[in-house]
Amino acid sequence: MKIRVLTLFPQMFEGTLGSSILQRAREKGLLDIDCLNIRDYADNKHKKVDDYPYGGGAGMVMTPQPIFSCYEAVQRELQLEGRPRTIYLSPKGKVFNQNLASELAQEEALIFICGHYEGIDQRVIDQLVTDEISIGDYVLTGGEIPAMVMIDAVSRMIPGVLSQEESYQEESFYSGLLEYPHYTRPKDFNGLQVPEVLMSGNHKNIDTWRRKKSLEITMERRPDLIDGLELTKLDKKLIEEINREAEK
């Protein structure tokens, strides 16, 4: 996948993109990521990228020309047919989730536009952006951190990026539930024991225990996720057990 980030602060991405899973994926050629400085494309003498908003109001707004010029340069470089999926990180956008991450992971290329100040000129959104996306109901100083979050979440869905293709399939949200607890050696740590079922060697019992724990944790912390889940007969039985245990 080709990912291009249009930003005023490309240096912010160096640590995230140059370490761990994302770095290995880039080295293996699974991800082609480049961050472009919008300021480099400003056509004025002082490389100014913001101006006062028409109609008055607090703060400054990023002007359209540098963003359009940067975007057009990316389009020429990518040489794709049609307009690539272009994401503007905005608190007004639809909320990012695992389903959207899976959807975006199917794209050949993604372009992220990171706003700053009071935002960007609406004409950029109207003409270039395909998706306005938010990572949560709060306000950040710019779109860079949300872009990093989305790049990380989308990238791990691309085949080969993770060391085992199945390794993301039991994580929180992938199956619609929060993830079950994990344990490793030693068996006894300061008197705290690993559940016996995990050392039984009975994989059916282990799978049932894990499913029950996922249901239990989700019911406690994110009951809204249960409402949108297609429950199996086993799930319903386990939920009954969880409810009985809670009543004791």
Image (cartoon, helix red, strand yellow):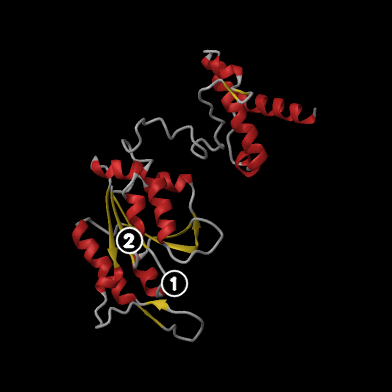
Q: Quadrant of residue 241?
A: top right
**Which part of the image, by quadrant, shows the C terminus?**
top right
State the residue position of label 1. Answer: 119
Q: Quadrant of residue 14?
A: bottom left
User: Which amino acid lies under the numbered mark 2 shown in the image of this protein?
Assistant: Gln
Kindly identify which numbered label has been placed on residue 47. none
Q: How far separated are the C-alphas under marks 1 and 2?
A: 20 Å
Q: Residue furthest front?
A: 190
In the image, residue 204 above or below residue 129: above
User: Which amino acid lies under the numbered mark 1 shown in the image of this protein?
Assistant: Gly
Instruction: Please state the horizontal and vertical placement of residue 64, each as a whole percent of the image.
Output: 33, 75
- Element type at mark 1: loop
Q: Residue furthest right?
A: 248
Instruction: Please state the horizontal and vertical placement of residue 29, each as a whole percent of the image.
Output: 23, 42
In the image, residue 40 above or below residue 16: below
Instruction: Please state the horizontal and vertical placement of residue 101, each as a whole percent of the image.
Output: 42, 47
Q: In the depicted view, which residue is nearer to us: 244 or 59?
A: 59
Label 2, residues with CA under 10 Å away: few <14, some 14-19, many ≥20: few
Which one is earlier in the sequence, the residue at label 1 or at label 2? 2
- Point 31% across, 35% down: residue: 160
Label 1, residues with CA under 10 Å away: few <14, some 14-19, many ≥20: some
Instruction: Please state the horizontal and vertical placement of residue 224, each as a whole percent of the image.
Output: 63, 44
Mark 1 vs mark 2, foreground winner is 2
- Point 53% across, 29% down: residue: 182
- Point 51% across, 81% down: residue: 58
Decide if residue 53 is on the left or right side of residue 233.
Answer: left
State the residue position of label 2. Answer: 11
- Element type at mark 2: helix
In the image, residue 242 above or below residue 120: above
